[in-house]
């Protein structure tokens, strides 16, 4: 299959630009498109055959449900069997935007879209390209992140082509995305609202409307705990991992830099290809190896925006050993570390300060 790449001009989006993509969606075929979080791999959410194609294109296990993207609140009423008041309150504050809600599904939604679950994940994206594709197609669009299963999510159309060219019908190129991490997922289908995946919308913000909201235990765990099963099926899989061995260092800035420099020297001496995942604030302090700055600690959104692209870069450069600082930044730290820990297979080292 040839994958058609269509460049869109964000300054001047016209309905006609979406005619072909919308028709493909209506025909049950696949179109990748940008959202404000990451690129999505879209197909008609009510068409089980389209959902099956999504799983196949990504190489994704079919028990891992898809998020259904909508453009208006009436759609939520069609897709969900029960809508608690909390869902309306969250929608009013955070939609359109990077929040996904899990609700009991209506009979309209096929089991093929929800991985056999009786709940459905719904999100109203704010990206105008995503909105226009949904509106012009007249469909609800099921869209997982547009990456090959296991690889970092995609934040540019080039990444989507890398992973999915030849496997899907079209990619709408709207340039780099804004946020760079997937949406916050909140489960409202049971008594207690639980965050199943941290994202750009933080627990603190959600608590302003839903004081009883909490993280699912599997989300905040710093290790892969035995017996703690993630409630979002997708959160249990190995994810985002670069081919090289990634290890995260925690501790004071000085201790982390010293420990990483030491490891880098040893691996270089042994002939390894070594990289350091640093920040604008620290990049000059690493003596050797390929040093990549992920962004600035002073502007944590830059770290979120670059994370997946940086993880892809290590593979392109054939890096074997990656040493990363840790990013417990104020607002997005939980979301950033959730992805980075998975990418590192939970390998974390405590760098000790020198005892004088
Ligand atoms: O920002 C995003 O959410 C992006 C863009 C494209 O919208 N989409 C995305 O989809 O990240 P995906 O498929 O890569 O991740 C969806 C996650 C998975 O971990 C999946 O298991 C979980 O949501 N999920 C979907 N439906 C669910 C349900 N009914 N119950 C529990 N978890 C669900
Ligand atoms: Mg994904």
Image (cartoon, rainbow, N blue to C red):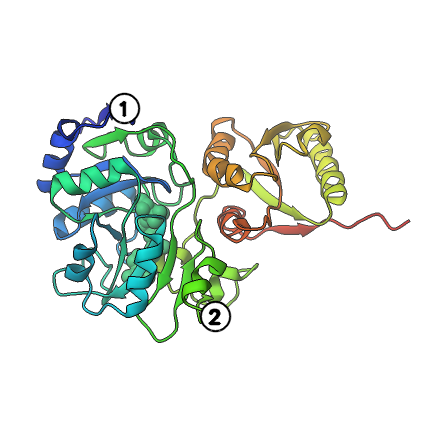
Could you say which quadrant of the image residue 59 lies in? top left
Could you say which quadrant of the image residue 184 lies in? bottom left
Foreground pick, 74 / 123 = 74
User: Is the CB atom of the residue marked by disc 2 within 8 angstroms of ligand 1's nearest atom?
Assistant: no
Q: Residue at x 55, y 50 (%)?
A: 333
**Residue 241: x and y, percent?**
47, 43
Could you say which quadrant of the image residue 195 lies in? bottom left
Q: Which residue is mark 2?
A: 227
Label of residue 1 in the image: none
**Residue 207: x and y, percent?**
46, 64
**Residue 348: x and y, percent?**
62, 51
Residue 197 shown left or right of residue 279 in the figure: left
**Residue 171: x and y, percent?**
25, 31
Foreground pick, 301 / 338 = 301
Residue 355 in view of the camera? yes
Please say if the residues under marks 2 and 1 sit with CB atoms less than 8 Å apart: no
Q: Residue at x 47, y 68 (%)?
A: 228
Above/below status of 174 relative to 322: above
User: Is disc 2 placed on a helix, strand or loop?
Assistant: loop
Q: Residue at x 27, y 24 (%)?
A: 9
Foreground pick, 119 / 211 = 211
Residue 260 shown left or right of residue 67 in the figure: right
Q: Disc 2 versus disc 1: distance between alpha carbons?
A: 48 Å
User: Is disc 1 placed on a helix, strand or loop?
Assistant: loop
Tell me which numbered mark, 2 or 1, is placed earlier along the sequence: 1
Q: Which quadrant of the rendered structure holds the N terminus?
A: top left
Label of residue 9 in the image: 1
Q: For mark 1, does the 10 Å Cα neighbourhood hold few (<14), some (14 to 19), or many (20 or more) residues?
A: few
Residue 49 shown left or right of residue 155 in the figure: left
């Amino acid at each position: 299959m040839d994958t058609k790449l269509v460049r869109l001009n964000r300054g001047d989006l016209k309905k006609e630009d979406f005619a072909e993509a919308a028709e493909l969606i209506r025909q049950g075929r696949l179109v990748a498109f940008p959202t404000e979080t990451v690129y999505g791999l879209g197909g008609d959410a009510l068409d089980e055959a389209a959902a099956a194609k999504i799983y196949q294109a990504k190489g994704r296990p079919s028990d891992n449900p898809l998020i259904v993207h909508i453009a208006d609140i009436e759609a939520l009423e069609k897709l969900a069997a029960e809508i608690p008041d909390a869902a309306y309150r969250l929608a009013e504050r955070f939609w359109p935007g990077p929040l996904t809600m899990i609700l009991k599904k209506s009979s309209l939604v096929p089991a093929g879209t929800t991985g056999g679950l009786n709940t459905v994940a719904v999100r109203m994206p704010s990206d105008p390209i995503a909105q226009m594709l949904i509106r012009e197609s007249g469909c609800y669009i099921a869209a997982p992140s547009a990456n090959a299963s296991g690889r970092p999510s995609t934040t540019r159309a080039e990444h989507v082509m890398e992973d999915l060219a030849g496997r899907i019908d079209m990619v709408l190129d709207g340039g780099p995305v804004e946020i760079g991490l997937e949406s916050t997922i909140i489960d409202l289908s049971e008594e207690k609202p639980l965050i199943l995946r941290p994202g750009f919308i933080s627990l603190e913000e959600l608590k302003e409307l839903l004081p009883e909201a909490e993280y699912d235990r599997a989300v905040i765990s710093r290790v892969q705990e035995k017996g703690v099963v993630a409630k979002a099926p997708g959160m249990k899989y190995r994810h985002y991992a670069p081919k090289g061995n990634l290890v995260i260092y925690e501790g004071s800035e000085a201790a982390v830099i010293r420990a990483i420099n030491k490891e880098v020297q040893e691996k270089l001496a042994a002939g390894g290809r070594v990289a350091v995942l640093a920040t604008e604030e620290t990049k000059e302090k690493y003596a050797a190896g390929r040093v990549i700055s992920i962004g600035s600690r002073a502007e944590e959104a830059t770290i979120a925006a670059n994370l997946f692209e940086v993880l892809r870069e290590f593979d392109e450069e054939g890096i074997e050993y990656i040493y990363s600082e840790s990013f417990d930044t104020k607002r997005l730290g939980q979301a950033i570390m959730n992805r980075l820990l998975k990418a590192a297979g939970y390998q974390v080292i405590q760098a000790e300060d020198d005892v004088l």
